[in-house]
Image: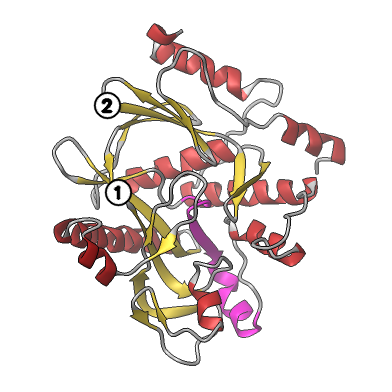
């Protein structure tokens, strides 16, 4: 087990930015840095930055590599369900993708009544609301209980730094935020991707609880899944073997996802009204271990941890220089 010095060193060596001079079209969001190339291609680089409750809070060792490689696995095993934006993987943290015309919705699919954020169904339900995102939820449900069937709880995508806003199918269709045809295709593909995800997760001893999908239109107007898919940042995964016992006892499920950090934060403060305290190194390393445990369980392969003596940023720069020498 790593001692406190090793943990601090691991955190200090995290990839916190991936801006490289000379590569065009740089932009940055909470987790990923991106480059808009001139030929309708984009580079997405997953850093180790960690966000929660709309704030970047820490850096988590190996997180960017886990996200990219987890999404790679799921893009591969769902390619027959829905086309995706991937072109190639120049580096374990980097994916080269088609530049899509993104559709302004996040398609959140939920199979269980759970969550800890203000836009999650459980806090709404606990406040007495029963019509959530246009769906009527039964009386008498408990936290972490399966829903009668998966539902889509869409949100409108926020501008940089803003909050996603809950919406409903009726509002989307009445405002034509997307066309009626696009909405139905996004809904169909979202539920199909979720069904495949639940099937594959179950084979790995996991429950895919909920997730979000983002879609865009390719050069032919086809609805394509983009961004990431079934990663621990965008999804909840529970350990199947212990779920029933822990649910019966009123305990939180064993999770391998971002909810671990959200629950730690809400145990320390109200993240919507109070400052979020610094996250201890032990908690960050435990969080990193959960992400690694998830990718190893999903893929059935040992996670290839980078050599701590080598700079991830330098490795990425070398990979980009090989792939795009015109910018270096």
Q: Which image quarter holds the N terminus?
A: top right
Q: Which percent across, then down, holds residue 81?
A: 24, 53
Q: Quadrant of residue 133?
A: bottom left
In the rendered image, residue 184 lying in the magenta stretch gets the answer no
Q: Which percent across, then down, holds residue 119?
A: 49, 67
Residue corresponding to mark 2 = 40
Viewed as shown, does residue 250 lie left or right of 194? right
Viewed as shown, does residue 301 lie left or right of 50? left
Q: Quadrant of residue 39?
A: top left
Q: Is residue 149 above or below residue 8?
A: below
**Residue 128 - label:** none
Residue corresponding to mark 1 = 215
Q: Residue at x 35, y 72 (%)?
A: 151
Q: Is residue 124 above or below residue 267?
A: below
Q: Residues within 10 Å of mark 1 (few under 14, many from 20)?
A: many
Determine whether the residue tagged by mark 1 lies in a helix, strand or loop.
Answer: strand
Q: Give how far apart the Cα atoms at labels 1 and 2 are.
A: 16 Å
Q: How is the image coloured?
A: secondary structure
Residue 129 vs residue 305, the one in the foreground: 129
Q: Is residue 47 above or below residue 133?
A: above
Query: What are the residue bounds of the magenta stretch?
Result: 231-250
């Amino acid at each position: 087990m790593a001692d406190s010095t090793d943990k601090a060193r691991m955190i200090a060596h995290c990839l916190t930015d991936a801006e490289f001079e000379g590569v065009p079209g740089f932009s940055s969001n909470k987790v990923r840095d991106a480059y808009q190339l001139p030929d309708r291609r984009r580079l997405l680089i997953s850093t180790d930055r960690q966000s929660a409750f709309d704030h970047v809070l820490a850096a988590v060792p190996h997180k960017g590599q886990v996200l990219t490689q987890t999404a790679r696995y799921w893009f591969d095993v769902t390619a027959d369900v829905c086309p995706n934006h991937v072109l190639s993987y120049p580096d374990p943290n980097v994916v080269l993708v088609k530049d899509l015309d993104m559709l302004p919705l996040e398609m959140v699919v939920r199979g269980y009544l759970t969550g800890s954020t203000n836009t999650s169904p459980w806090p709404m339900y606990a406040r007495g609301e029963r019509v959530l995102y246009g769906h009527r939820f039964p009386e008498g449900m408990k936290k972490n209980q399966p829903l009668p069937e998966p539902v889509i709880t869409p949100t409108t995508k926020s501008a940089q730094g803003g909050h996603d806003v809950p919406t409903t199918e009726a509002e989307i269709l009445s405002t034509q935020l997307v066309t009626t045809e696009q909405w139905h295709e996004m809904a169909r593909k979202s539920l199909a991707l979720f069904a495949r995800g639940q099937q594959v997760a179950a084979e790995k001893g996991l429950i895919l609880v909920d997730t979000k999908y983002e879609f865009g239109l390719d050069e032919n107007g086809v609805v394509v899944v983009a961004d990431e898919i079934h990663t621990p940042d965008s999804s909840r995964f529970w350990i199947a073997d212990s779920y029933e016992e822990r649910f019966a006892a009123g305990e939180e499920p064993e999770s391998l996802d971002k909810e671990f950090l959200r629950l730690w934060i809400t145990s320390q403060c109200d993240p919507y009204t109070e400052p979020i305290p610094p996250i201890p190194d032990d908690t960050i390393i435990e969080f990193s271990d959960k992400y690694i445990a998830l990718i190893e369980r999903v893929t059935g392969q040992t996670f290839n941890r980078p050599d701590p003596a080598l700079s991830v940023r330098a490795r990425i720069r070398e990979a980009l220089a090989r792939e795009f020498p015109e910018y270096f």
